[in-house]
Amino acid sequence: MGTLQSSTRAFGSVRRYIQGPGEIDNLKNYTKPLGSKVYALISTGLFTTLKARLEKIYTEESDCLFFDEFSGEITYAKLDEKTANARNFGAELIVAAGGGKVVDAAKIIAKENGIPVVLIPTIASTDAPVASMSAVFNDAGEQQGIVLFQDCPDIVLVDSELIAQAPVRYFIAGVGDALATCFEAKLSAMSDSPNFVSGGKRFTLAGMAICEACEKTIMEKAEAAVLAVRQQLCTPDVEDVIEANTLLSGLGFINVGLCGAHATNTGLTVLTETQGTLHGELVAFGIIVQRVVEQRPLEEIAGLISFMRRIGLPTTLEELGVHEMTEEMLDRVTTKALSGFWKRYPYYVSKKSLGDAIMMADALGHKYSN
Ligand SMILES: [Zn+2]
């Protein structure tokens, strides 16, 4: 049931990806060719620290910085305000530092202003920094839409020291987002669905190889990496998992495609109960749901759940804040989920069967939680 109308394949990527301890201090080397009027968008929680750090880097007379704060959800109203701030300043480029929301917002502001964007993710909780899309929400945290871009961000600069020092929960959520990449890519490829490059083309071998490298890295190194980040250590395993969470996961999904795990995540965002959760945590639960729909053998799903638990990922609805799932709630979740990437699943999925798979995933999560 292929959905593509042509066999043309395409591959897209960020122009440059840089990752290493203390790399933020080299920021100016990378931004200099792009311009000197820098609009800096920084997460509120890190604003004072990072503003001071950037001011130490940009000390020349020709350097001109405008600092703006970002907190809460990415809403259309907030985007309008920040876009106007960058325009009124006459920004030549955007430097954005923070979590997935800041990164996603900066991509939209850069596009609206027609200027390059340099992203500095301070946590490795999602693959957003590399992706050629941003998710927009309402104030209640419900996903409102996805903005697609022609190109991936210009530069992604990852300071692995900053990542290792951030709360481990973000790093773990990033592992959940990355773990989904290959499972979803294989289904999207099987249904011959369009990727997210050049309006949607067939996946390349390179794209699929990245997804496989992502899965291998997560399966082999995530457990040790999480243990290290719990102690704020930046070991070679941590470096590899940062790359998997950010670069491999991001390039993997845009170049091949998403499916049930992310669709289930989008569905779960309609519940106010899930507001305190992170994207990767919802996606992680979505992986179990997808594996149930795929009819994977029980021992395989049990193995996946115990791996996720060793990492520290949620595997039950309760752990996502949903203590009771009423029929009405499940109806809203499945309606939203089926309107999204579940369409890329190679076979028909009904509302009832998806609802049952969600409840089954929860039951399995409880059963194999020890
Ligand atoms: Zn994701």
Image: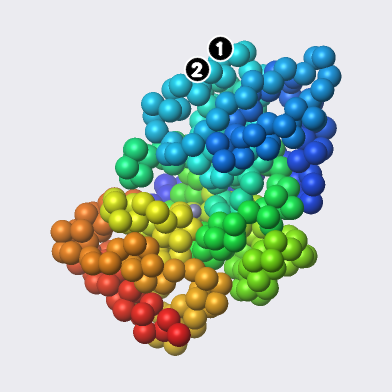
Q: Dot 1 lies on which element? A: helix
**Residue 182 appears at what percent x and percent y?**
54, 64
Q: Are marks 1 and 2 in contact (CB under 8 Å)?
A: yes
**Residue 204 appears at what percent x and percent y?**
60, 54
Separation of disc 1 and disc 2 at Cα? 6 Å
Q: How is the image coloured?
A: rainbow
**Residue sitting at 34 percent across and 38 percent down?**
138
**Residue 58 appears at what percent x and percent y?**
79, 25
**Residue sitting at 74 percent across and 20 percent down?**
35
Left or right of 281? Residue 30 is right
Q: Which is nearer the eye, 191 or 242?
A: 242
Evaluate whether residue 184 shows in this view: no
**Residue 262 appears at what percent x and percent y?**
42, 57
- Which residue position is annotated with label 1? 88
- Which residue position is annotated with label 2? 84
Amino acid type, label 2 = Ala
Amino acid type, label 1 = Asn
Q: Is residue 31 above or below residue 4?
A: above
What's the mark number on residue 101? none
Left or right of 246? Residue 23 is right
- Residue located farthest toward the left when viewing the structure as drawn: 328
Q: Is residue 127 above or below residue 173?
A: above
Q: Dot 2 lies on which element? A: helix
Q: Is residue 159 above or below residue 153?
A: below
**Residue sitting at 39 percent across and 29 percent down?**
76
